[in-house]
């Protein structure tokens, strides 16, 4: 609803700038985490007693990673030729990684113990406060810069609130900048970081390509439809995250049970995705016209085609749990890179030829490739002996 309001009050071109900066900036969030969330989920779910030690040593590491990620995002924007006000917008949004990285560090420890309330509340709180701050900034006349700055202020407020009261006492530990510990964590987490960075870049790759190839208006048209995809994909991603600790334990001791759980949840996700995908496919143009207004009717075709992609997003969401908790997740990394490159090459070929819908076709090709390769690896893993 927030982006619907923004799309209606801005021109398509200005909304395209906002969508592009957000699409570009969010790619660096997983770089700031650097796969540490997966390490927490994997280790703490198996050995809960390590929680305090990990927390004390990971807080300063996550801060350092956030600062480095801000610098990398600005450097990447410079390499793409951004300058002036648009470069400033990228920097302003990148600052949100500093408090955000700590908010979800704390949430990860509760997720590892299969207590997802902290993650859920934090996610909702960041979203709501971003809207409140963003609309306030807009009303005060701060424009795009104020809207993007609201992401920093919302994450900072949620961080302050999360550290207040009983929860603050629970997370009160003596910070330790332990380089040997950090080196060991990063030596393990870079694989998970690579998966996450590739996955996030992959999802927003068409928007970035469309903005650089076709311009701001096309970014606005594609971005209007893709915002629903970014929201919708949270459903299967949240289920996958909730199941990660149990999958991590089952892969050690009971792969037959894990296989049954995987197939059961895969079937549920597929069945749940069908009515969503069908509704998107059939109602694209009238829905986008009703929600965003007549200026965005061109995004109806994009939204309809996203209905096909959405079904594949759902069924592809669980395989990562098994691949990333397996004994050798690095073996899958070349295929993850291949999936990204297939989407990139498809986008570079299709977007100049068929326009904005070429971005959707690029994702569709990538998802079909991923469906085949992911499940080949999953069933290969589930056939082997228990992990050690």
Image: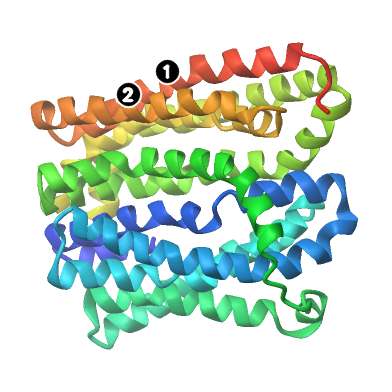
Judge from the rendering whether residue 279 lies leftward or rightward of residue 302; answer left or right.
Answer: right
Q: Secondary structure at mark 2?
A: helix
Alpha-carbon distance for marks 2 and 1?
8 Å
Which residue is drawn at the image coordinates 74% and 16% (left, top)? Answer: 382
Indicate whether 217 appears above or below 179. Answer: above
The quadrant in which residue 94 appears is: bottom left
Q: Tag 2: Cα neighbours inside 10 Å, few (<14), some, or many (≥20)?
A: some
Which is more foreground, mark 2 or mark 1?
2
- Which residue lies under the disc numbered 2? 342
Give coordinates of residue 339: x percent, y percent. 40, 25
Confirm whether residue 114 shows in the render. Answer: no
Judge from the rendering whether residue 152 lies leftward or rightward of residue 19; answer left or right.
Answer: right
Confirm whether residue 213 shows in the render. Answer: yes
- Which residue lies under the disc numbered 1? 369
Task: Tell me whether circle 2 and circle 1 mark residues in contact (CB < 8 Å).
Answer: yes
Indicate whether 304 appears above or below 242. Answer: above
Indicate whether 293 appears above or below 355. Answer: below
Which residue is drawn at the image coordinates 37% and 24% (left, top)? Answer: 366
Q: Secondary structure at mark 1?
A: helix
Give coordinates of residue 152: x percent, y percent. 44, 75
Mark sitting on residue 26: none
The quadrant in which residue 365 appears is: top left
Q: Quick one: 206 or 82, which is closer to the camera?
A: 82
Which tag, 2 or 1, sits closer to the chain's start?
Answer: 2
Judge from the rendering whether residue 367 lies leftward or rightward of residue 162; answer left or right.
Answer: left
Which residue is drawn at the image coordinates 77% and 25% (left, top)? Answer: 261
Residue sitting farthest toward the front: 180
């Amino acid at each position: 609803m927030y982006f619907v309001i923004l799309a209606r009050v801005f021109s398509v071109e200005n909304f395209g700038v906002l969508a592009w900066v957000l699409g570009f900036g969010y790619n660096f969030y997983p770089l700031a985490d650097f796969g540490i969330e997966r390490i927490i989920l994997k280790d703490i779910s198996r050995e809960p007693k390590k929680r305090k030690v990990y927390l004390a040593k990971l807080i300063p590491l996550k801060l350092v990673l956030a600062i480095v990620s801000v610098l990398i995002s600005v450097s990447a924007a410079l390499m793409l030729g951004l300058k002036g006000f648009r470069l400033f917008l990228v920097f302003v949004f990148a600052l949100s990684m500093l408090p955000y990285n700590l908010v979800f560090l704390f949430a990860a420890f509760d997720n590892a113990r299969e207590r997802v309330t902290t993650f859920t509340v934090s996610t909702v709180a960041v979203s709501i406060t971003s809207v409140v701050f963003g609309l306030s900034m807009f009303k005060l006349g701060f424009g795009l810069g104020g809207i993007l700055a609201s992401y920093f202020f919302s994450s900072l407020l949620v961080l302050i609130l999360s550290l207040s009261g009983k929860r603050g006492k629970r997370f009160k530990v003596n910070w330790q900048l332990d380089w040997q510990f950090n080196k060991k964590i990063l030596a393990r987490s870079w694989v998970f970081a690579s998966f996450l960075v590739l996955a996030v870049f992959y999802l927003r790759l068409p928007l970035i390509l469309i903005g650089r190839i076709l311009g701001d208006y096309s970014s606005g048209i594609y971005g209007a439809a893709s915002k629903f995809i970014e929201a919708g994909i949270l459903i299967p991603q949240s289920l996958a995250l909730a199941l990660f600790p149990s999958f991590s334990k089952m892969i050690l001791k009971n792969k037959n049970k894990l296989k049954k759980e995987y197939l059961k949840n895969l079937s549920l996700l597929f069945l749940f995705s069908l009515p969503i995908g069908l509704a998107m496919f059939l109602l694209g143009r009238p829905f986008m016209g009703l929600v965003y207004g007549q200026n965005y009717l061109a995004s109806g075709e994009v939204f309809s085609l996203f209905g096909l992609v959405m079904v594949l997003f759902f069924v592809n969401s669980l395989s990562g749990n098994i691949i990333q908790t397996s004994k050798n997740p690095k073996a899958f990394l070349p295929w993850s890179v291949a999936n990204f490159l297939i989407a990139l090459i498809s986008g570079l070929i299709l977007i100049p030829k068929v326009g904005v819908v070429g971005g959707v076709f690029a994702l569709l090709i990538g998802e079909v490739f991923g469906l085949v390769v992911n499940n080949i690896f999953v069933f290969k893993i589930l056939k082997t002996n228990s992990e050690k």
